[in-house]
Amino acid sequence: MLPGLDVLEAKRRAATEQEDPTAFLLADHEWLRDLLETYRSALKSEDRLDEVRAAMVELRPLLDVHIRLEEEAYFPAIEPLMKEIGQGSTFDMYGEHDAIRIRFDQLLEALERGNGAAAAYAALARSLLVHFENEEDLIFAEAPKHLTPEARREVLDKFDSIGVATSR
């Protein structure tokens, strides 16, 4: 079991109680940052590669769900607002998600081969961290101010339909 899932669930629950889908997604980002650091150090030890591989296999579907939350629920809700306030589009985030998926696949392949995992992990980590920064600076900083309470509830309802229980 991946470390910190209990803390993530508590933060997601708090965000849901506040009807704040942005805080929900930010909780994921924070957890993923911590996870990246945990397994970066694990990669330095050859005898922990199996542990890292198992963790990454477990992480992949969770990351895919996070991406779906953004692409299928959050971004569509805020796209008109972003254009209206002159922040541009969420369109670039979809391409970053594609790059993250590719880098994740490359990491899993390297872990299976038993070589090149450190470089593949570093590439994935860089992609994720740059992506988080872009979302947080360009989207998450502005969008919450412009999402109505009804829009927030609708996004959280879509989170539920994607399969992430928001405990509402």
Image (spheres, grey):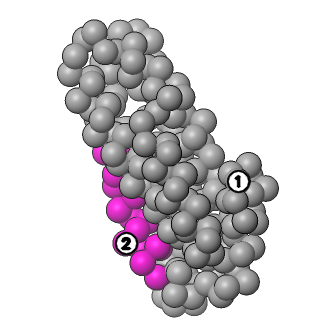
Secondary element type, mark 2: helix
Identify the magenta region.
Answer: 126-142
Q: Is residue 152 left or right of residue 33?
A: right
| Residue 118 placement, left or right of 7 | left
Residue nearer the viewer, 70 or 54: 54
Q: Magenta span: helix, strand or loop, mainly?
A: helix
Crowd band around label 1 with a 10 angstrom C-alpha radius: few (<14), some (14–19), many (20+): some
Question: Who is closer to the viewer here, 37 or 137?
Answer: 37
Residue 79 figure quarter: bottom right
The amino acid on which the numbered mark 2 sits, given as a three-letter code, is Asp
Where residue 165 is drawn, which disc sits there?
1
Mark 1: amino acid: Ala
Q: Is residue 132 magenta?
A: yes
Vertical relation: 165 (above or below) 123: below
On the image, the x and y values in percent for residue 28 come to 48, 54
User: Is 154 part of what is drawn in magenta?
Assistant: no
Neighbor class of circle 2 (other Cα within 10 Å; few <14, some 14-19, many 20+) is few
Q: Would residue 131 be visible to someone looking at this image?
A: no
Mark 1 or mark 2, which is nearer the start of the sequence?
2
Please name the residue that numbered disc 2 is placed on.
137
- Report helix, strand or loop for mark 1: loop
The residue located at (35%, 9%) in the rendering is: 114
Which residue: 62% across, 67% down?
Answer: 16
